[in-house]
Image (cartoon, rainbow, N blue to C red):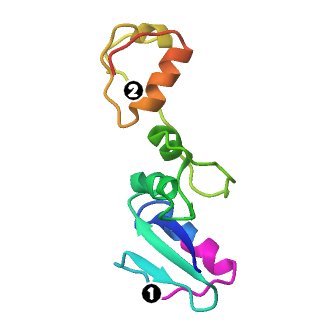
Amino acid sequence: MKLKIAIQKSGRLYEDSVRLLRESGIELSNGINKLRAEAYNFPLEVLFLRDDDIPQYVEDGVADAGIVGENIIYETNKKIKFIEKLGFGKCRLSIAVPKNESYKSIKDLKGKKIATSYPVILSKFMKSKRVQARI
């Protein structure tokens, strides 16, 4: 039986994830432009996926574990267990307003329409600040 770990196929976490596995002594077959790679010296299969897909693969049991940003874990809201911060990859989510618009506090966004790639995270944040906006 092989352990299956899902990592990003490209993007900010790809290099550090592969380096972590190699520094752990795992020798991988060349996974460049492949969907999966197998370790030569350990019963491990690495699945290379889009970051948004990793939580679903873990929730469904297709992968036993995954390396993905916390923002993706919180945004996808899947039934998975967060285990450990690995110390690489940083993400900061910010709210931007037009330069000509007055902004003093989050309350200034009440009733505004806000575009985002992270509607779940933003909705929870706005709710915690008691500000209603269209997301």
Residue under label 2:
96
> Residue 6, image x and y in percent?
50, 66
Quadrant in the picture for residue 64: bottom right
Residue under label 1:
30
Quadrant in the picture for residue 19: bottom right
Magenta span includes 19 = yes
> Residue 113, image x and y in percent?
30, 17
Decide which of 2, 32 is in the foreground and name it. Answer: 2
Q: What residue type is labelled 1?
A: Asn
Residue 73 position (above or below residue 42) = above
Question: Is 99 positioned to the left or the right of 24 in the image?
Answer: left
Tag in front: 1 or 2: 1
Badge 1 density bin: few <14, some 14–19, many ≥20, Cα 10 Å:
few
Decide which of 18, 57 is in the foreground and name it. Answer: 57
Magenta span includes 73 = no
Decide which of 130, 104 is in the foreground and name it. Answer: 130
Q: SS for tag 2? A: loop
Q: Which amino acid does label 2 sit on?
A: Ala
Residue at image x 42%, y 61%? 11
> Residue 122, image x and y in percent?
45, 27
**Residue span colored magenta:** 18-29
C-alpha separation, residue under disc 1 versus residue under disc 2: 41 Å
> Residue 58, image x and y in percent?
51, 57
Decide which of 86, 57 is in the foreground and name it. Answer: 57
Badge 2 density bin: few <14, some 14–19, many ≥20, Cα 10 Å:
few
Question: Is 90 positioned to the left or the right of 101 in the image?
Answer: right
Residue 98 shows which numbered tag? none
Residue 2 position (above or below residue 48) = below
Q: SS for tag 1? A: loop
Residue at image x 45%, y 42%? 76
Residue at image x 56%, y 55%? 89
- Mark 1 or 2, nearer chain start: 1
